[in-house]
Image (cartoon, rainbow, N blue to C red):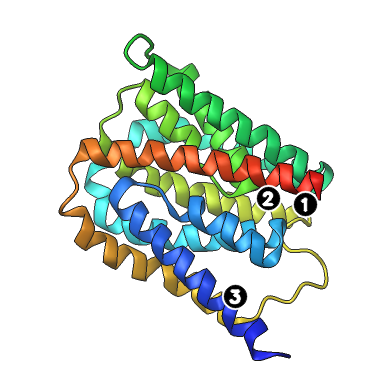
């Protein structure tokens, strides 16, 4: 095999996951937003999202160790069951539905939600268990199908006026649960990695190593970013993730 076909994807994957880990340390999310579309371009949407789930799990464990004191456990407990339910629905969708049509729907939904919250956040507040359950279900579904749970949770965070520090900390056990559940449910549905696809071992190394590198870099950057700016960054990331999903779906449909 041409060495460039082995090492170039590994280098690109390492760069994407490191950047994502840095952003996740600063704003609470980032690995899935950056890694999922990048790995999908390298390996295809199914395997790419699955490897993104692995990378996001590693980063979430590390960041949970750093931020665990600020986790809002009651809110996590309310989110968890719907994350799992959404993941099962997402795994079924990956198995039976057209991936490009699904990405168009998800991307459009995220962009509409982000635009609505940014435009209405001074007049609209999301409170109660209904908003928590809805955001959990959508996050679980999106994480399994597209590797991006963050947008739904970022939209909910702004609408509910969730404190940035608590939100960023609580996202880590949320991401860990969401990504592990995504890996399990897709494996049960036979939708984790396409049959016959070989993922080079350097790419696996990049998936595991990129998160710790990003968290290390992000720990330096985080000292210089205040919570308000971190929240703006999180919303921008949500918009980027939605745009990527939409563009990828449209390109796949037209191509």
Q: Position of residue 13 (x, y in %)?
A: 53, 70
Question: Contact, CB < 8 Å: mark 1 with mark 2?
Answer: yes
Above or below, 145 against 161 in this view is: below
Q: Callout 3: helix, strand or loop?
A: helix
What number is the disc on residue 189? 1
What residue sits right under mark 2 in the picture?
185
Real-space CA distance between mark 2 and mark 3, rounded to the nearest whole angstrom: 26 Å
Q: Quadrant of residue 52?
A: bottom right
**In terms of secondary structure, where does tag 2 sit?**
helix
Q: Which quarter of the picture shows residue 48?
A: bottom right
Mark 3–mark 1 distance (CA, rounded to whole Å): 27 Å
Task: Residue 255 in the image: state x and y as whole percent.
Answer: 81, 51
List the residue tagged with mark 3: 9
* Mark drawn on residue 66: none
Q: Nearer the viewer, mark 2 or mark 3?
A: 3
Describe residue 242's horizontal placement relative to residue 75 as left or right: right
Q: Position of residue 140 (x, y in %)?
A: 57, 39
Residue 117: percent from left, percent from top:
43, 21
Of residue 14 and residue 173, the one placed in the foreground of this image is: 14
Say which of 95 and 85 sits in front: 95
Q: Callout 1: few (<14), some (14-19), or many (20+) C-alpha neighbours within 10 Å?
A: some
C-beta proximity under 8 Å, tags 3 and 1: no
User: Which image quadrant: the N terminus?
Assistant: bottom right
The answer to whether residue 215 is seen in the rendering is yes
Residue found 62% across the figure and 31% down from its top = 108
């Amino acid at each position: 095999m041409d060495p460039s076909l082995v090492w170039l994807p590994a280098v690109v994957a390492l760069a994407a996951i490191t950047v994502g880990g840095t952003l996740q340390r600063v704003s609470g999310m980032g690995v899935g937003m950056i890694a999922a579309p990048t790995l999908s371009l390298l390996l295809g949407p199914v395997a790419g999202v699955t490897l993104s789930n692995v990378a996001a799990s590693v980063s979430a464990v590390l960041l949970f160790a750093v931020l665990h004191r600020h986790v809002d456990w009651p809110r996590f407990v309310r989110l968890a069951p719907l994350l799992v339910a959404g993941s099962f629905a997402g795994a079924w969708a990956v198995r039976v539905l057209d991936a490009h049509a699904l990405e168009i729907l998800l991307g459009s939904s995220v962009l509409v939600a982000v635009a609505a919250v940014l435009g209405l956040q001074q007049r609209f507040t999301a409170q109660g268990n209904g908003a928590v359950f809805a955001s959990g279900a959508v996050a679980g579904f999106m994480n399994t199908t597209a590797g991006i749970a963050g947008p739904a949770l970022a939209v909910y965070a702004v609408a509910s006026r969730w404190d940035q520090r608590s939100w960023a900390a609580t996202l880590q056990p949320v991401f860990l649960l969401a990504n592990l559940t995504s890996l399990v449910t897709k494996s049960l549905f036979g939708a984790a990695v396409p049959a016959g696809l070989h993922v080079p071992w350097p790419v696996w190394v990049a998936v595991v190593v990129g998160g710790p590198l990003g968290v290390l870099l992000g720990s330096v950057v985080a000292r210089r970013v205040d919570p308000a700016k971190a929240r703006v960054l999180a919303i921008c990331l949500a918009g980027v993730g939605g745009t990527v999903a939409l563009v990828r779906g449209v390109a796949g449909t037209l191509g």
